Structure formats: structure tokens, C-alpha cells
Amino acid sequence: MVRAGSKEKEETPVHGHVLERILSHVSLVDLVPASHVSKAWMRAVFSSLRHFNAPKPWVIVHAQGSRTPNRVTARAYDPRSDVWFEVQPPAIEHVSAVRSSSSNILYALSPATLSFSVDPLRLTWHQADAPAVWRADPIVAAVGGRIVVAGGTCDFEDNPLAVEIYDVASRTWSSCESMPAVLKDSSASTWLSAASDDRKLYVTEKHSGTTLALDPETKTWSGPYNLRPDPSIFYSVISFSNNRLILIALIGDASNAKGLKLWGVNCESFECEGEIGEMPMELLEKLKGESLQLSSIGVCFSGKFVYIFNPSWAEEVIGCEFDKGGCRWWSIRNRNGNGTERLVLTCSEVGIEDVRVALRSKNSRIKALQ
């Protein structure tokens, strides 16, 4: 109301498409309190997310201290708002290294315990007994409601290709058909790239392109298949994008990477269905970093997004969005790590409800970085 004799004018309320447009430029963290202003604002928030600027998968960089208690901190990048967030998980002491051999899970494996986190922001950790066979560097992936632990066993174990499956609902382990003998000399995650959906786990040998698939329901492997659409490929990894397997490969040789290309893969025939895109040369140079060489790549992925980085120099992360049969590329400056921490990258589809849960938690926090 305008007071008598006052020259002040009543402010015009913002509503409808104008409000939705404004909210489309607001980060998810700030949209949570905005949705509590009124019912009209809540509708505007969700309409904005549906029609103007939908949530996009976040890349999350987990940094683990090198000294006891080896706690993990994290920072997350939201491409929707182009903002980095500090994501502080509950203070958990990890007696072993935190790892991620597949984008959909973060885990730590000790002789007694398998700790793992599969929620989008990796704030909730689950504890399970360790698998029966001790492993130093296995493939670990979430496939539906199961956690598959494959290969990576130590020399003193009888079967370096052993596979075990943990059922999250029943909290029980079961054995599985071992990895095929073709991977006998490269059964660790150092040599293998892994990707999974709700039905199967796929692994590919990074240097040869030899690829296999595991069905946890039948506990059987299929393959091997050869994923080498270009003879000049010297290193490759796999990812998933909207139920499609993607091959990401370096072209040239370890001393002179001349390009990075992507192909779609048919998960039935395991034939490459055509080249999807190629990383622009200026971004490839950023990926090489100060050494000007690129002998390997790491990836994390979710939905239509894949993030590519240099494992030995992760100061630049290259983002790729699959759009209308092609690729949209950009570069992200990694604002994480101080040189003494281990960095592990994952990728997750983070929605406003995930952020709301994190903000309500007493044991974790999330805030934008300046």
C-alpha cells in the first residue's frame, strides 16, 4: 500500500513468464528457497526448470587428503548455471583410497569393508562386508540394484579374474562367472574402462579395444568384441549417453595425440554406428596441458553429457553435450585440489530435490563458490 502523501509507488509484482525467465538464470541452490516464497513462486520455479533451463548433469571433483583421517571433500560444477559449488559430505574417515571406475558409483575398498555411495551428490555412504576375494584395483560398478566387483585381484589369489556381485536390497554377496581369459593380463581398472546401465556392465581394454559385457542377472559374460573403428586409435574409453554406448578414442600415438573422436556403439552387435563428433583442436591442446602430450584420458558421464580430462593433469575438464546427432564442446577450469590431494571425478544428474535434501541435512552442506 502507498502511504498518504507519499510519492512512492507500489512495486509491480513479477509473475508469469517474466518470473520464469528470471528464475531460469538462478542456480538450483538458490531456487530451493525461491520455491518456498509462495505457491505461485513454487509453480514458477518448476515451470522454469521444465521449459526454459532444465537441470544438467553435474561434474563432481572429490579430493581426498593424503594424511589420516583421509577425509574426502568435494566441489561440483553445474553447467546449467555455470557455477562451482562446495559440497561438504558427512565427515567420514576412509582407511583406503576413494575411487571411481564407473561414473555411477564412488567407493572405498578395504580388506574388511566395501564402502560405496551412489546418490547424485555422493553424500550418503553405505557399508558392506568386503568381497571374499581380496582385490587391489578392481572394476566396481552399479548395475541396477547390484554392485559388481570384477578383476583387480592380487597375485597371491588363485583367480585374478574373479567376479562377485553384491545385492543392495538383501545385503548379500554371490559369485559370478569369471572375466574371460582374454583379460588375464589386464583385469584391473588401470587397464580397463567400464560403463553400465540398469541391465549390463561393459568393459573395454583401453589399449586394444577388446570389449566384453556382463549380465548380472544370468551372471554370464558375452564377447569379446573389437571396438576399433579407426586403425589410428591408440587409446580408448567407453561411456553411456541416454542408453547408448559411446566410444571415446585418442588418434595418433602416445607421444603425439592428433585428435579425439567419438563413435556410437550398437550394444547388440557391438558395431560402431558412425562417428558422432571430434574434439576441437584448441580444446585438445588444453587437455594436453603443460606437457603438450596426451597418452591417456579419463571420463565421467551422465545423460547427454560426458566430461573428459587428463588423469595426470586435471586442471582443464572438457565438457561435451550430445545434441541432435552432434556434439557441443566447452572447457571448464578445474578449481579443485592443492597438488597434495587425490582427485576423483564423477558425474551425476542432480535435480532440485537432491539439492533440497542436501540443504536440509545437518551433516552436510552445499554452497556456491565465489
Image (tube, rainbow, N blue to C red):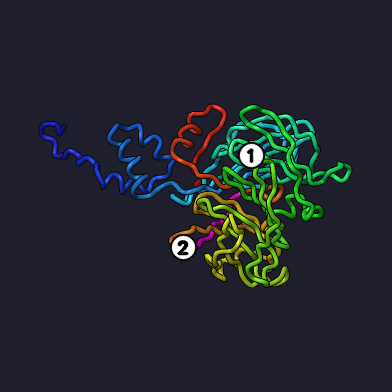
Tell me the residue that label 1 is attached to: 217
Query: Which residue does the image show at 73% across and 62% down from the upper left?
Result: 207
Between marks 1 and 2 in the image, the one whose residue lies nearer the viewer: 1
Query: Which residue does the image show at 43% across and 46% down from the upper left?
Result: 55
Direction left: furthest residue: 5
Q: Is residue 191 above or below residue 88?
A: below
262 or 82: nearer the eye? 262
Query: Which residue does the image show at 62% across and 46% down from the upper left?
Result: 200
Q: Amino acid at mark 2?
A: Gly
What is the distance, in whole Å, between disc 1 and disc 2 at their CAs?
Answer: 32 Å
Point out residue 88 in the picture as x, y percentages from the top left corner. 58, 36
Q: Quadrant of residue 23?
A: top left
User: Of callouts 1 and 2, which one flags the residue occurring earlier in the amino acid sequence?
Assistant: 1
Helix, strand or loop status at disc 2: loop
In magenta, the rendered stretch is 325-337
Q: Residues within 10 Å of mark 2 (few under 14, many from 20)?
A: few
Residue 325: which disc?
A: 2
Direction right: furthest residue: 156
Helix, strand or loop status at disc 1: loop
Quarter of the picture containing the N terminus is top left
Q: Main secondary structure of the magenta part?
A: strand
Q: Is residue 243 left or right of residue 174?
A: left
Q: Is residue 194 left or right of residue 198?
A: right
Residue 339: which disc?
A: none
Point out residue 129 in the picture as x, y percentages from the top left corner. 73, 29
Q: Amino acid at mark 1?
A: Glu
Q: Is residue 68 left or right of residue 337?
A: right
**Exactly how many numbered labels are in the figure?**
2
Query: Which residue does the image show at 64% across and 27% down from the upper left?
Result: 170
Q: Is residue 329 magenta?
A: yes
Q: Is residue 269 above or below residue 97?
A: below
